[in-house]
Amino acid sequence: MQPPFRSNREVIINAPLGAVWSFSMDLTKIAEFHPRVVKVDLLSGKSIVMMNSNELEMQKEVVKEGIKQFFEPYQDLLRRLLGPAASEIGLARGDSTRLWRAKRYARLMEEFQQFVSERRLGLRPVPPRTLFPLLEGATLEVDEDLHRRWLALLVNTARIDYGNEVLPYFPDMLKQLTSEEARFLDAAYDEMTIGAEQRQADIRASNPHLDDSQTFDLGTSGKLIGSISQIAIDNLERLRLVTRNRGGLSLDNKVVFATAGGNHLYVSDLGQAFVIACRLPK
């Protein structure tokens, strides 16, 4: 007995989905990829298959499933690249990266809404050039400490009563920081503000030649600098969040010859504004 005619062939089509869809709906194209079909003649003269709405939806699901299966090996590779973070993202459960980002976005919006509602904060429109990079950066963040700073940046950008300016490049700067660098910048800022009196006493104790009439900028303590790597300090300097020079610019064309304390590190004016913008209001 002759076995029934069966054929199975797998192909990968490198083309837009629309082109694949159009090709698959044309029955006369079967001969171009089927090894045992030479020509297709249609009695009706119509080469395009006409489907009702249910058949059309089924065909779309078939195409979607094929795309999903095609990308599955790359999902495995992505899980390996992400390591432990894959569980946080949800890839271990088969979630797509787009779905994961959607979940992160939903969490951010929920926390934002809860915070502004509890404190009854008035909101203002946020320019797209600031808002879109902010949301993009926030939905890619897995570190909880940095996530809190993204939330703070969004709150301060949107609230009416924020007394400072959130500059449009703040999201890009936050995206380039590690949690260690952000914590260091926070601590350095606290040393020169809430810890200013103690910092002045420490500097005078290390410099007995200074008399009480001399004033000086409050550089970051050596203990704090020693707690972070030189690479991290280089990155903070690259972003101009910290500086080794606190000399002011001339407004009257006078030339002043002064040697900056190059062995001291200061939080720049930009760094101070950035730290405040990344802190939730109390």
Image: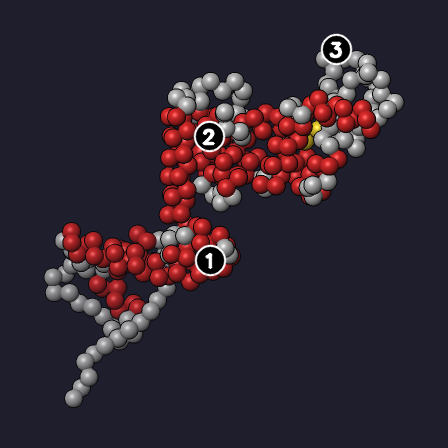
Q: Give the spatial CA distance, label 3 vs label 2.
A: 39 Å
Which residue lies under the disc numbered 2?
154
Q: Give the spatial CA distance, label 3 vs label 1.
A: 60 Å
Question: For the residue carrying disc 1, how many other residues have a C-alpha within 10 Å: few (<14), some (14-19), or many (20+)?
Answer: some
| x 73%, y 19%: residue | 248
Label placed on residue 252? 3
Q: Amino acid at mark 1?
A: Arg
Q: Amino acid at mark 3?
A: Asp
Question: For the residue carrying disc 2, how many other residues have a C-alpha within 10 Å: few (<14), some (14-19), or many (20+)?
Answer: many
Label placed on residue 79? 1
Q: Is residue 248 left or right of residue 23?
A: right
Q: Is residue 247 left or right of residue 80?
A: right
Q: Is residue 66 left or right of residue 171?
A: left
Please identify the quarter of the rendering in which residue 213 is found: top right
| x 39%, y 21%: residue | 120
Q: Amino acid at mark 2?
A: Leu
